[in-house]
Amino acid sequence: MKYSKRVVGVKASEIREILKLAARHDIISFAGGLPAPELFPIREMEEVSRTVLEEMGQEALQYSPTEGYEPLRDFIAGRMAKTGVKTDRDEILIISGSQQGLDFAGKIFLDPGDTVLCESPTYLGAVNAFRAYEGNFREVATDNEGMIPEDLEKALKETPDVKFIYVIPDFQNPSGRTWSLDRRKALVELANQYGIPIVEDNPYGELIYEGERLPSIRSLDTKGLVMFLGTFSKTFAPGLRIGWINAPKEILAKCIMVKQSSDVQSSSISQREIAVFVEKYDFEKHVEKIKSTYRKRRDLMMDSMGKYFPDSVEWTHPAGGLFTWVIVPDSIDTKELMERTLEETKVAYVPGASFFPNGGVKNTMRLNFSNMPEDKIVEGIRRLGELLKREIG
Ligand SMILES: Cc1ncc(COP(=O)(O)O)c(C=O)c1O
């Protein structure tokens, strides 16, 4: 069979392959980015589904406008104020998870051979989405405060055909790090200077466990260059597949066009279910409940790593989100170690190499702390610590 070059260039996601193994019941999995399923509002959703079908059943099962359900777009526009953005429904497009927004960014900005500037490391799902449009990657050096402006400027100056800058400024996947306000401002200044759009992917901003939420990159945008991606996957339920794009009208118009040919619209029923949920119940309280569980799990993972990991291992202290990033001594290749870890300890993690689009870094791993119950977090970290101690010797 002869497939397009586009498809031949895309590799199967290693995370998905690992997730298949990690789903086994005997495995303690720190691998996926899954929310805690026991926090899904199942009883409330029984009521909500009934209300939607009783009160708007015909609309909920019918085709609906590509832009999305207006009451939901209004709710999202109001919620964007939390990130410092003043906007309205005309700048909101409902999409089928923020993953679809990544696909659209690739579709509207990239020609084969164009370059995306991204954080090093960055989200693997975005890399795969952009690769499908035959994009290349120039990784920009990062530290605890975000992209290093000098390296970003160098990349903008020296790289031909840069089409956009892709960033995850809040509680990044995979590193758990958050950009400082100064770095956010520096990014916008450089993007303005070079006239390059920014794709701000922000699935985790609402899940903040300490400190104040910083203004989004989109809120600092003065030239209509920022496309913001949000989602209900982590604050509500990923199975509904509802996310959004908040962008200047010019960019949004292109996204609406590609959405029409991609899937026409996102699920009419899912959109109404979320809209009715936020009307009937206190969404803020729901998010607070999730935050309080995840904060406890984060603290427990941090404490357990302090207790069981060897001294030569380091990790990030995420102020929100779902992940911590672990750096082990250079001598360890976490990808090679993965299979043995699964066999010997029944613990799963994601090898960090997957998050560097141009490869090269072998001694890191991403651990998720949202999905496993407390006792499994302690036991999994204890087993991983023992194995690392044996490896390091
Ligand atoms: C950084 C980032 N972007 C986008 C997504 C996609 O999320 P969804 O399509 O469920 O909104 C994820 C999911 O884990 C993610 O971590």
Image (cartoon, rainbow, N blue to C red):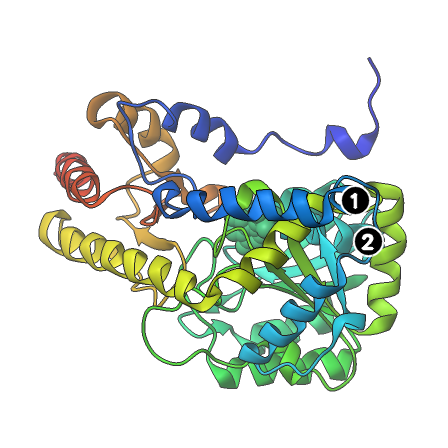
Q: Quadrant of the C terminus?
A: top left
Residue sitting at the far front: 54
| x and y, in percent, of residue 219 in the image | 63, 82
Q: Is residue 136 left or right of residue 184?
A: right
Q: CA distance from mark 2 to mark 1?
A: 6 Å
- Density class for disc 1 (Cα within 10 Å; few <14, some 14-19, many ≥20) is many
Q: Look at 46% across and 80% down and name the residue there.
A: 180
Residue that carries the numbered disc 2 in the rendered image: 110
| x and y, in percent, of residue 246 in the image | 71, 68
Work out whether mark 2 precedes mark 1 in sequence or the reverse, and give the earlier one: 2
Residue that carries the numbered disc 1 in the rendered image: 133
Q: What SS does tag 2 mark? A: loop
Q: Look at 15% across and 51% down and name the residue there.
A: 304
Front residue of this view, candidates 270 and 380: 270
Q: Quadrant of the N terminus?
A: top right
Can residue 175 be spotted in the picture? yes
Q: Is residue 232 left or right of residue 391?
A: right
- Density class for disc 2 (Cα within 10 Å; few <14, some 14-19, many ≥20) is many
Q: What SS does tag 1 mark? A: loop
Amino acid type, mark 2: Leu
